[in-house]
Image (spheres, grey):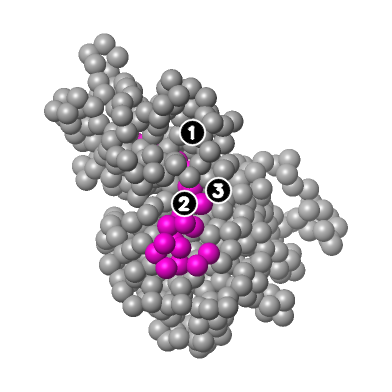
Amino acid sequence: MSKSGPEKEIRRRIRQEGKITFEEFMRLALYHPDGGYYSSPAPFGESGDFYTGPAVHPAFGACIANQLYSMWELLDRPSPFYAVELGAGAGILSRDLAAYVSNLPLAFQTSICYLSLDRYPTSVESSTGQRILTEGVPLRGITGCIFSNELPDAFPVHRFRMEAGRLREIYVSYNDRDGIIEVTGEPSTPDIERRLARLDWGWPDGYEGEVNLHMEPWIREIASSLDRGFVITVDYGYLSEELYSPARTMGTLQTYYKHVDGSSPYQRIGRQDLTAHVDFSQLMSDGESSGLRNVTYLNQGDYFKGLGLDAMMEGLRRLDIPLRERTSNLRAMQELADAEGFGNFKVLVQSKGIPGLSAGNLFPSKAFLEDVTPPIKADHHMSTTESTYPQSNFTLDALWPDEGKEDD
């Protein structure tokens, strides 16, 4: 098999330089313009290598819509109210959010201005707003909310290893016998040690981990774009103490190919996803340094429940729809909150220019949630949720606690 564009470039740089950082390797594998992973037409969904929360059920977009509505009210109902999605991908979230906004007050519908930002075009048309092709956040004076789902985990990371009590960086090299190999050396930048200096190391020899140096300029640019409003970051990760726990000896780097993880990062270069967990402590600290205030940090399951997920499920149980359709939707909605999956993702909400704000202010009132409309899966959502989600987690009583058996 001929080598991909990223692999050719990686080998060329190694020949020229002797070794390259893992950050450079990961950047080329994911973002090389000629065959990088994210330049492929369909890395997401059932036919791709992984799927994200918005593809599971439109309740994801509905919960974000309810959050944006609450934020609009906290900002004294500005018009326009900008909803800026970063890393919009195929546009599933924007489609679902736009569809659900039609259930919210008309004044909000006429105020919201949706912008989808991504570095790549998509063949799927978003049903609302404007799509901007960009690698950064070229906006200024935004009043509203800037949000992302599973974006920082795709930033290229530096990797390190402890050897003889010293911090060493992991580099990527090559030899004729073994092909692409790992070697270690002095850190390529003092920023790696600076990032880790705030931790009480105590790591054993052989301990490996990752450092994401792209989050600081990313959150700084977001903060510069935002005049007044909020930032929502949804991703998988931990606070620093857990992410760099001495028990987590092999780091968090993962590969995904056809929904299976665990292969070497040096296989299928440009054809498999590479990802690492997010250090939310770093994101909070970098945000504060950039003028953002940390408002709340929650598991996605708890966050979505505060935005109406349980109420949507209860409303769905009352809908006059076929049992099979109801079951499929309820299971997909439950998947968004499951503690063993998407529900354990983390949500960080930060604010700018809103004094006196508390975490409780973010969520809609009980009266609002009593009247939420349950969204229904469409053709662009995962059709295999029922077969891929652990069946043992569900009983009929859990899905419809107040109902008996029902005929199709």
Q: Which residues, given as a range, are shown in magenta?
A: 270-294
- Give me the disc on residue 251: 1
In the image, farthest residue toward the left: 16
Secondary structure under tag 1 reads loop
Residue drawn at x 47%, y 56% is 285
Q: Nearer the viewer, mark 2 or mark 1?
A: 2
Screen quadrant of the N terminus:
top left
Question: What element does badge 3 sit on?
Answer: loop
N-term-proximal mark, 3 vs 2: 3
Q: Amino acid at mark 1?
A: Gly
Instruction: Name the residue: 28% across, 67% down.
Output: 138
Q: Is residue 403 left or right of residue 278?
A: right
Task: Please name the residue that numbered disc 3 is placed on.
Answer: 239
Judge from the rendering whether residue 278 lies leftward or rightward of residue 395; answer left or right: left
Q: Quadrant of residue 145?
A: bottom left
Residue in the foreground of this view, choosing between 298 and 134: 298
Furthest residue in direction top, as rendered: 177
Q: How would you rate the neighbour count of disc 3 (Cα within 10 Å): few for under 14, some for 14-19, many for 20 or more? A: some
Q: Is residue 183 visible?
A: yes
Residue bearing mark 2: 282
